[in-house]
Amino acid sequence: MTSIDDLTSEIMKGLTEYAELADSAMKKAVRQTAASVKKEISANAPTRTGKYAKSWTTKKTAENSHKLEMVVHSKDRYQIAHLLEKGHAKRNGGRVEGKPHISPAEEHGENLLESLIRKELS
C-alpha cells in the first residue's frame, strides 16, 4: 500500500514532467511561428529593389525556463515599414496606397501559434 506522501510526490513528479513538456512545446511553436511570419512578410512585401523584403528577420528578445519571446522585424528598413503598410502622402500632392503585408502575417501568426500549441499538447 502506498502512503499519501508517496502519492503526493508521484503526482508532483508527473506535473513537473508535463510542465517541462509544455514549455518545450510552446518554445518550439513560438520559433516556428516567428519563422513563418517572417517568411510571409518577406513574400508579400512590396518589391522595388528587393532589399526591404530581404531585411526581415527574427530576434529572440527574452527567454527563461518558462517563456520565449521573439520579435519579427526589419533590420535596416524599419523606417519605411509603416509607410509601405499604411500608405503615405506624396511630396507634390496625392497619395500612395499602402500594401498590407505585415498585419495579415501577424493574424496568420496568431492563429498558427495557437494551433501549433494545441497540436503539441494534445
Image (cartoon, helix red, strand yellow):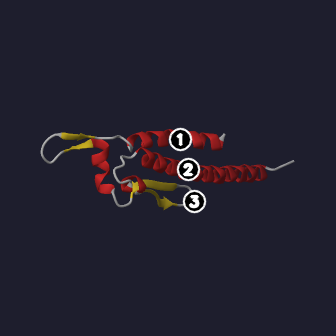
- Residue depicted at 53% across the width and 50% down the height: 30
Q: Residues within 10 Å of mark 2 (few under 14, many from 20)?
A: some
* Residue most extreme to the left: 92
**Between 109 and 47, the one nearer to me in the picture:** 47
> Residue 79: x percent and y percent?
29, 56
Q: Residues within 10 Å of mark 1 (few under 14, many from 20)?
A: some
**Between 9 and 121, the one nearer to me in the picture:** 121
Numbered mark located on residue 32 in the image: 2
Mark-to-mark CA distance, 1 and 2: 9 Å
Numbered mark located on residue 65 in the image: 3
What SS does tag 3 mark?
A: loop
> Residue 53: x percent and y percent?
40, 52
- Label 1 with label 2: CB-CB less than 8 Å: yes
What SS does tag 2 mark?
A: helix
Label 3 or label 2, whichever comes before in sequence order = 2
Numbered mark located on residue 112 in the image: 1
Label 1 or label 2, whichever comes before in sequence order = 2
Q: Residues within 10 Å of mark 3 (few under 14, many from 20)?
A: few
Q: Is residue 118 left or right of residue 100?
A: right
Mark-to-mark CA distance, 3 and 1: 22 Å
